[in-house]
Image (tube, rainbow, N blue to C red):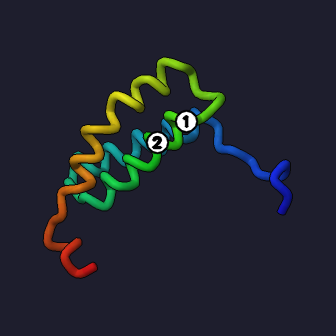
Amino acid sequence: MHADEFHRPRPETLIAALLHLMTHYSRTGCPRLAVCILRHLQYLGLHPDADPVVREICAGLHGTWAEAAADRGPADQWH
């Protein structure tokens, strides 16, 4: 695959995925979901097609989700 064949997901797709992940996290508190959320925030925050306000919000939420991702529960002690 050539670099010009790579298709970057649309910002709207990433936002929809974030909303889904955040909703699921609110029900479970799973730190692994927090890691996924953190990665999506980072990717969306750097996405060249994302609105500047969206990128700013992602940057602002980064610290909160980094803390949640660092919280290691019993399930994470196995790895």
Q: Is residue 51 left or right of residue 19?
A: right
Q: Quadrant of residue 28?
A: bottom left
Q: Quarter of the image containing the C terminus?
A: bottom left
Quote the CA–CA distance across marks 1 and 2.
Answer: 6 Å
Residue 56 quadrant: top left
The circle on residue 46 is: 1
Amino acid type indicated by mark 2:
Gln
Q: Residue at x 46, y 42 (%)?
A: 42
**Residue 77, image x, y percentages:** 19, 76
On the image, the x and y values in percent for residue 20 come to 40, 45
Mark 1–mark 2 contact, CB under 8 Å?
A: yes
Q: In the image, what residue occupies the spot 27% across and 54% down? A: 69
Q: Is residue 11 left or right of residue 41?
A: right
Q: 10 Å neighbourhood of mark 2: few (<14), some, or many (≥20)?
A: some
Give the residue number, with chain letter if any, for mark 2: 42
Q: Secondary structure at mark 2?
A: helix
